Image (cartoon, rainbow, N blue to C red):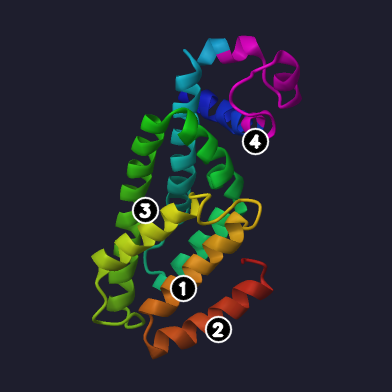
Amino acid sequence: MEDKKFQLAEKLRTYISRYGINDFSEEHLQKVGLSTNELKEYFTDRKDMVNTILAHERRCFEEIFNEYNFEGWNAIDILLIVSNEINNRFFNVTPSVTMALSKAYPDLYEEHKNLRSDYIYEKIKINIEKGMEQGIYKQDASSEMIARMFIAKLNDIHNPEIYPPEGFTFTTIFNNLIDSIIKSITNEEGKRYYKQRKQLYSVLNFR
């Protein structure tokens, strides 16, 4: 049942992006492949819908790490791969719909943000430590501090006062965030490697 609800969550995000969260008309639901009966069957209320949409967003992040076995990978390549995959699935994590949900259900959104931040924090911290062991990140880098800074900047992406959605795309902001963090933590060897890999990924349309 959970998988079915997550499938419906994708369609619900499409619906909300087009028509908003306040009015669920049968005519509009049909245009995104949903029906009132289907929603009643799988969701107890609108709050349950929103909670499922946010849980689905977190799962989109987690699936990237579950689908790739990063054991033995270069730490820079990991960040580039993750960046590419998030961009490919950016509709599932883009802030435009999420902000609408946060206004309607602030408590649910705050819990979601904390869970998402905790998960990503651990992954970034592991990546920093891996890069230091591989000799491509600065040895005096603080994995905890950098991970916390990354989370703070990531949360800023979802702040329309900082990045108005009509002026900035999620892809542009996120790519700049990844570029900034890599440049700030790499030593000279890491910078050379990053420059080479960034060019390669660009040619292969990974970025």
Location of mark 4 (residue): 17
Q: Give the alpha-carbon distance from disc 1 to disc 4, as whole Å.
A: 30 Å
Of badges 1 and 3, nearer the viewer stands 1
Residue at the spot 40% in from the left edge and 90% down from the top edge: 188
Disc 3 target residue:
120
Q: Name the residue beneath numbered marker 2.
A: 196
Residue 191 in view, yes or no: yes
Residue 117 x %, y %: 35, 49
Q: CA distance from mark 1 to mark 3?
A: 17 Å
Instruction: Name the residue type under label 3.
Output: Ile
Mark 2 and mark 3: span between their CA atoms?
Answer: 26 Å
Q: Which residues are magenta?
A: 15-39
Q: Quadrant of residue 122?
A: bottom left
Give the SS element for disc 1.
helix
* Secondary structure at numbered mark 4: helix
Q: Position of residue 5 (x, y in %)?
A: 52, 24
The amino acid at mark 2 is: Gln
Q: Mark 4 against mark 3, which lies toward the viewer?
A: 4
> How far apart are the two marked residues, 4 and 3, measured between alpha carbons?
25 Å
Q: Is residue 19 left or right of residue 89?
A: right
Three-letter amino acid code at the position of disc 4: Ser
Q: Residue at x 55, y 84 (%)?
A: 196
**Residue 81 vs residue 133: left or right?**
right
Our reading of the magenta stretch's main secondary structure is helix
How far across and how far down the image is residue 199, in percent? 61, 79
